[in-house]
Image (spheres, helix red, strand yellow):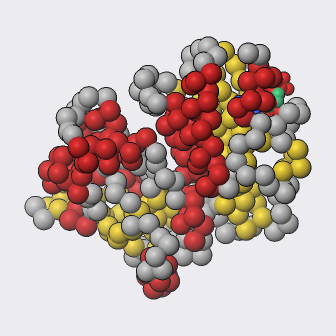
């Protein structure tokens, strides 16, 4: 199968059709229309086989993840997903693999309302680069730099689950049954909180998505905002599956230091707390917990019942 046939068959019509796509797949570049009064949010992320996912990883999961990690960046800006570009480097043309990859990518594109408008296809070691673009009302995007003294720190979902899921997939951890599959799913199919991210505009003072581990990513907010932060270890949300697999101590370490969560970590001024609680009570929000607050000074401290604990750095550190 030639390159053009491949693109036509698998990638010409992914995601919903959108009236703001003036020209999609097929020409030298896509033409997109950003509505007046909006800004374009653009981000890109590359997944390299054997580095960002195991070599034998399911193609549909690769398709889903390659888009999800980008949607998560848009979510962290409070942007509404609109368009994506896909650069695919393939060792060979395997039609079953392509079909499966496109199915995973497409499932998430449809639910997020994002249209694939172009890309590039080349031969080489399996590598997937997705660029996602979205729109945000001018001047309202969530940044890392807005956290202020006294703001509350919140996190969505169940941090640590995805890194434990990856460890299970790679055989570095042993586990079976429902707990295993719940944790694996968090790695295979991260949800990306774009809907919730959009609703945080005007409420969150700073926001980031967790890709490198909660503590380290909160460090990005404190660095950009020139403040400090304290996390209360006892308030960290631990999923039942993570707790059952690792026990409390190691589960907390996974929640603080494990990566690949693609959850949102954000700060909220006390004056906006009631509005946040109203959204959380609406039934259309993910699980979300207050885990600490913004302080004077610099850096992130974690306080447990026994006193201050060392912040684990980097993803999967907890297994070393
Ligand atoms: P060019 O030679 O101008 O780079 P290509 O032959 O690479 O053009 O691509 C032809 C068309 O197909 C372009 O519109 C491009 O955006 C699109 N395209 C190529 N690869 C992909 C892909 N993997 N997914 C979606 N669109 C693609
Ligand atoms: Mg090209």
Above or below, 51 against 294 in this view is above
Give the residue at x 46% y 45%: 189
Q: Position of residue 130 (x, y in %)?
A: 64, 37
Give the residue at x 67% y 41%: 131
Left or right: 63 in relation to 217: right
Above or below, 122 against 25 in this view is above
Left or right: 24 in relation to 105: right
Give the residue at x 17% y 51%: 244
Q: From where the camera sits, is residue 226 visible?
A: no
- How many dots with numbers? 0
Give the residue at x 84% y 56%: 20
Q: Position of residue 138 (x, y in %)?
A: 74, 67
Q: Position of residue 56 (x, y in %)?
A: 42, 23
Query: Ligand 1 sits in which quadrant?
Result: top right
Residue found at the far left of this picture: 306
- 283 or 193: which is nearer to us? 283
The quadrant holding residue 290 is bottom left
Above or below, 176 against 295 in this view is above
The quadrant holding residue 159 is bottom left
> Where, quadrant-wise, is the C terminus in this rendering?
top left
The quadrant holding residue 103 is top right
Q: Position of residue 115 (x, y in %)?
A: 73, 48
Q: From where the camera sits, is residue 131 visible?
A: yes
> Where, quadrant-wise, is the N terminus in this rendering?
top right
Left or right: 238 in relation to 249: right
Above or below, 319 against 80 in this view is above
């Amino acid at each position: 199968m030639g390159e053009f046939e491949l693109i036509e068959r698998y990638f010409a019509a992914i995601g919903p059709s959108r009236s703001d796509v003036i020209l999609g797949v097929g020409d030298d570049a896509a033409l997109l229309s950003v509505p007046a009064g909006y800004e374009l949010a653009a981000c890109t992320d590359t997944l390299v086989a054997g580095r960002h996912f195991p070599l034998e990883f399911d193609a549909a999961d690769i398709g889903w993840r390659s888009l999800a990690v980008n949607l998560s960046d848009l979510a962290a800006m409070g942007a509404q997903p609109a368009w994506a570009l896909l650069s695919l480097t393939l060792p060979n043309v395997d039609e079953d693999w392509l079909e499966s990859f496109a199915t995973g990518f497409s499932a998430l594109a449809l639910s997020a309302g994002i249209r694939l408008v172009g890309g590039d296809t080349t031969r080489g070691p399996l590598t997937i680069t997705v660029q996602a673009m979205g729109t945000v009302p001018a001047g309202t995007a969530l940044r890392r730099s807005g956290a202020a003294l006294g703001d509350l720190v919140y996190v969505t979902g169940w941090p640590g689950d995805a890194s434990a899921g990856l460890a299970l997939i790679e055989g570095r951890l042993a586990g079976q049954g429902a707990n295993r599959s719940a944790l694996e799913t968090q790695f295979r199919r991260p949800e990306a909180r774009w809907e919730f991210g959009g609703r945080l505009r005007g409420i969150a003072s700073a926001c980031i998505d967790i890709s490198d581990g909660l503590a380290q990513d909160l460090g990005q907010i404190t660095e950009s905002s020139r403040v400090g932060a304290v996390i209360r270890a006892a308030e960290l949300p631990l999923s039942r599956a993570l707790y059952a697999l690792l026990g409390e101590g190691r589960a907390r370490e996974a929640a603080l230091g494990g990566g690949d969560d693609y959850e949102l970590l954000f700060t909220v001024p006390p004056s906006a707390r009631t509005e946040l609680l109203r959204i959380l009570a609406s039934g259309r929000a993910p699980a979300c917990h207050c885990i600490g607050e913004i302080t004077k000074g610099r850096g992130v401290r974690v306080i447990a019942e026994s006193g201050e604990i060392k912040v684990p750095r980097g993803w999967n550190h907890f297994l070393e």
